[in-house]
Amino acid sequence: MKSENQDIWIQSMIDQLNEEDRLFCRPVINRLLELGYTPKKHKKSTFTVSFEKNGRIISKMEVGRNQRLIFWLRFSANEKYSPRFEEAVKRRPEAWIKRGQQYENHNVANCCGLCKGKPQLYHHIDSEGVRVERCGGYTIMVPGVSVQDVPETLRLIENQDRYFENLKIFIPLTFTKESSDD
């Protein structure tokens, strides 16, 4: 649920974009809101909004140079995605290295400890045909999205959201023993 204030700055961000990026943003933002994600404006930037639910960011949108959209998405719960999204995974190994230890060949599948149970992983096939897995705990910048990417983006968001909802249900609570001074 968004407030009137959130509505104003989301619209103000969308108004800064070119028409093609607006056509991409509107259905994506609407779906995120329908799924219960809360838009959060970044304090350091007038036109950057992230979408969060239960402490997990699923997407971030920003107005870049020339009124172009800079779009980030967390889609690691998805096993299949198009070459456009696979390329986004290939492009950003430094993001994972920055967040964890430096791993040989950038395969940082368990670097951050964010995942509970089975790790969420992004994956791609490298130039030698080897499947490489990367930490899936964070959003990835997907450059050059267009209105043609809306159906796949919505599918990825819905699958990721289902994963988050299942986590909420199935993660066991941890209890700590209270110490007594008797």
Image (cartoon, rainbow, N blue to C red):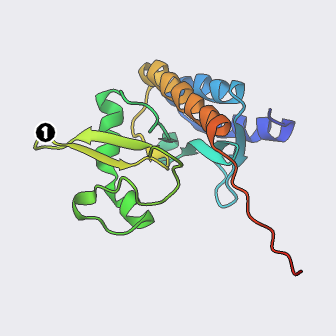
Describe residue 96's horizontal placement relative to residue 173 as left or right. left
Q: Amino acid at mark 1?
A: Gly
Identified at 60% across, 38% down, the residue is 167
The residue beneath circle 1 is 129
Describe residue 77's horizontal placement relative to residue 47 as left or right. left
The image quadrant of residue 158 is: top right
**Residue 52: horizontal and vertical position, in percent?**
67, 43
**Residue 9: horizontal and vertical position, in percent?**
74, 41
Residue that lies at the very extreme toward the left in this rendered image:
128
Identified at 34% across, 44% down, the residue is 89
Quadrant containing the N terminus in the rendered view = top right
The image quadrant of residue 59 is: top right
Quadrant containing the C terminus in the rendered view = bottom right
**Residue 65: horizontal and vertical position, in percent?**
48, 48
- Is residue 49 in view from this perspective? no
The answer to whether residue 138 is above or below residue 112 is above
Of residues 30 and 118, the one drawn nearer to the viewer in this rendering: 118
Residue that lies at the very extreme toward the right in this rendered image:
182
- Is residue 18 in view from this perspective? yes
Of residues 22 and 182, the one drawn nearer to the viewer in this rendering: 182
**Residue 179: horizontal and vertical position, in percent?**
81, 74
Identified at 59% across, 31% down, the residue is 161
Describe residue 55's horizontal placement relative to residue 70 as left or right. right
Residue that lies at the very extreme toward the front in this rendered image:
182
Identified at 50% across, 40% down, the residue is 74
Is disc 1 placed on a helix, strand or loop? loop
Number of labels in the image equals 1
Q: Residues within 10 Å of mark 1 (few under 14, many from 20)?
A: few
